[in-house]
Image: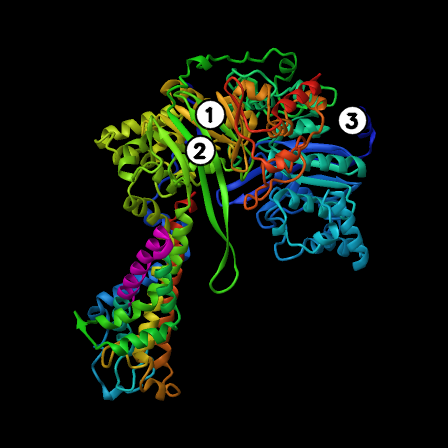
Amino acid sequence: MAVISAPASAAVAPRRRGPVMEFIYKQPLGAVSLVVILIMMFAGIFSELVAPYDPLTIDFASILAAPSWDHWMGTDAYGRDIFSRIIHGSRTALVIGFAASFIGSTLGAMLGVASAFFGGKIDDWIQRFVDVLLAFPIIVLALVVVAALRKTVVAGVDVNLVFAISIPILPRVARVVRAAALSVRVMPYVDAARAAGYSNSRIIFRHMAPNVVAPYLIMFTAFIAQAILLEASLSFLGLGVTEPTAAWGLMLSGNAADFYREAPWMILFPGIAISLAVFAFNLFGDSLRDYLDPRFRV
Amino acid sequence: MDARTDQKTHAETAPVLLSVEDLHVQFETTRGIVRAVEGISYTVRRGETVAIVGESGCGKSVSSLAIMRLLPRKTARITRGRIMLDGRNLLDLSDEQMREVRGRDVSMIFQEPMTSLNPVLPIGLQIMEPLFIHLKMTPEQAKARAMELLELVGITDSARRLDQYPHQFSGGMRQRVMIAIGLACNPKLIIADEPTTALDVTIQAQILELMKNLSRELGIALVIITHNLGIVARYADRVNVMYAGNIIEQGSADDIFLSPAHPYAIGLMRSVPRLDEPRGTRLETIEGLPPDLLNPPSGCRFSPRCPHRIEICSQPIELRPAGEGHLSRCHRVDEVVAGKLTKPQVVVARLAQQELDHTNPIMAVENLKKFFNVTLARKNWISQEKAVVRAVNDVSFSIAKGETLGLVGESGCGKTTVGRVVLRLDDATEGKIKFEGLDITHSSSGAMREKRRRIQVIFQDPYSSLNPRMTCGEIIAEPLAVYKIVAEKKAREERVAELLQQVGLFPYMAERYPHELSGGQRQRVGIARALALEPTFIVCDEPVSALDVSIQGQIINLLEDLQQRLGLSFLFIAHDLAVVRHISNRVAVMYLGRIMELADRDELYANPAHPYTQALLDAAPIPDPKVERGRAPRALKGEIPSPLKPPSGCVFHTRCPFAIEVCKEEVPETRQFGPRHLVACHRAEEVVAHAATARN
């Protein structure tokens, strides 16, 4: 039988770069945000080595010192070095942010895909449950959960705080992933998989899940930002991380509020750290989505 | 005929309205500069209908958007050329002046009537809008004019219709509204970009007939952009054939269809199956794909695919005369015109009817019904208004081993649902499906597993039928692994390569993702995936309708080859009568969930006994102006009724020219009309007799 010749241009393999170089080339903004995230991670992991001072050491000789060569970002009301506290605070922020967002998004995504695939009554019940969770503002829901549970520290992390932050994330991811999964479910390639007689689990994991990874990933990274913000808010309200641990939200509360006129650096730098982290994770999420979608690759 | 010749002489002497001169359009993309249109020139006289024909990506839409100056500002650039309308160069006008031209002097009708009307505004307002803006009419004047326009485009009850919203109109009706909007300010020129592509055949005929009559009566010039050669033959005075950003042939409809002077035009004409030619010839195809306009071949752009390519074809080429008023962009135009370069058509032997064993069918469907429950509206908190859609209502057919049964009908007739139920993607409401002698109507997924392998499917849309996250190799290898047909990984790769070659692709394409392939190539991957399971029966659901004409032919030939070599049986679902005729042994015609007529192919096309079959055949355009001129415009009246409220009795009686009282009351039984010819019509005998007298 006839073999139809393909155009000559199709035979030339496109120029291949490494995946990292490809990402930097295609998503310059994403690469910048990745650098910010990497710096944060580096600071979080090697806090002890990077920070010029111990974050907990009180130094009454330099209370409320303005930024200088000795203290790049000044000191707080106890004379603690703010730069060092921000570096240590990034560990708190990243651990809680990653953990809470991962738990919330993953459970939410599983719920969303199941809801879309099975449909009918199961879908109805899952969605009503999601409605109930969505009825509460994020911060209120987290407040209720964190107030109801006692502090349980495992490996230096307050597990209940992570849990409390992941709860409001779950329904939001479930909704978005369900919508994406619904549109995937009616695609002819899912029909083709059913016509080939594949099992439900194969269809869900091989054919549906990879096609909802994009919304999952962007939600996951965006909610890392949300979780960091939430952790900061809860700490600010005195319900999250407690003194003397270095945490960004905590640094904004307490006597920072009393001294912000005399020592604006006390709130300025933790504020910048939070904004920068949130911004970087959001931006990275967007770029990652575009990069991972094969349809965006030319 | 007389009206047409008058029209023709008029068109030839009428002054030139629009002339496009040496137009170049480029797009700046991240991958480089795409030369979408390179140096096209054509003229349109007053009252004339000019067609621009070509496949997707050839630049036909871009060139007309350039006339309207509607190209995206940031990326598109008109680098050279003039567009003269009534002595003014549209490219020199200010934005303000251009806005006055749009809608008043030139209006445009788009392909998709579903999305080109604003869903939140009543259609009356949308028709009146240009009247307020361009003609500064008062509301009363505008309303009177809007009613007049609706009547003009054949929408009755215009006063009430003006206040209705687009969703209350069917697709055909919406396209009429679009035409009314286009006509509102008495434009000199209407550009219609694929005006009927989204419509059914019988509706397409109505709309084209309407447009042609309006342009004749009102003296409006019409530019029709289309890929459909059939409608060009019937409705165009002059034709421009485009390929890869160039006009490659230009002339009257007769020139182009009766003595084409460019190998591409010849190939295009031959690759379309035709209703008026004896079947049995293999479709001639244009091999390969159109060039990438990022870096088109130097010289003749068609040369890489041209069967008559010689050395000189790599030299640049301009349009050359091929006859009076007939131009062709071919180095060997003289030889083509002299008929020295045509190839004889290949005749292939096929399984003759007699060889098919109808007593022991591979697939038998008996009294199949598929109803869907839908919720129309929520009456109050508790109760809802519900309705039943009878998508498939009492359908029976059987398919012999090695046979192709064509299933034709317009959208919404239930043909796709039949396919889905046969595939067990949806469960039947009633009836039986027997495959290889075994009842599979309700068999569980476990029992179904072995059988399932043998029943495969090829979908319409090659873009969404392949998982975008898997490479083509993974897609084809998956069934091999799941069913352990080829257990070992290395052997599986070899089998994938073999399957790719079988469908005319290269083994290296296994590494490609679907989006890296063209539409035709993807459809081949879809076919390879179906073949991987070694099926005996394949449901082809509109497998070629999303493809370009020259690619359609390639896929049809491939399916035929595979059928011969592997002894496959097909249920071939399509709306294109010519394609179905080409590929099928027997054909079933569906309308609103029921089979109207089922017969051997030649019998059905030569001797249609159901008025609906006749209407479909009449409405289907034939790419030959001579044949078309001899056919009376017999467009079927009216629209397809809603399947929510199907008509009583015979579902076709509301549109049937033969309907009598009994048709409204009794559902006609499916009865034997001739040998192996079934029909569901009370008056089949009269219908056939009437057709016979009409022919004489």
What is the three-letter code of the residue carrying label 3? Arg
The quarter of the picture where the C terminus of chain A appears is top left
- Up/down of B631 relative to A231, above or below: above
Q: In terms of secondary structure, where does tag 1 sit? A: strand
Ranked by sequence position, the earlier of labels 3 and 2 is 3
Ranked by sequence position, the earlier of labels 1 and 3 is 3
In the rendered image, residue B616, in percent from the top left (x then y), is placed at: 61, 29
In the rendered image, residue B518, in percent from the top left (x then y), is placed at: 46, 34
In the rendered image, residue B591, in percent from the top left (x then y), is placed at: 55, 35
Q: In this view, does A17 lie to the left or right of B54?
A: left
Distance from Cα at disc 3 to Cα at disc 2: 49 Å
Q: In this view, does A80 lie to the left or right of B538?
A: left
The quarter of the picture where the N terminus of chain A appears is top left
Which of pointers 1 and 2 indicates the residue nearer the eye? Answer: 2
Image: magenta residue range: A97-122
Secondary structure mostly seen in the magenta stretch: helix
Which of pointers 1 and 3 indicates the residue nearer the eye? Answer: 1
Q: Mark 1 points at which residue?
A: B405
Which mark is on residue B367? Answer: 2
Q: Name the residue under label 3.
A: B4
Callout 1 and callout 3 share a chain = yes
Distance from Cα at disc 1 to Cα at disc 3: 40 Å
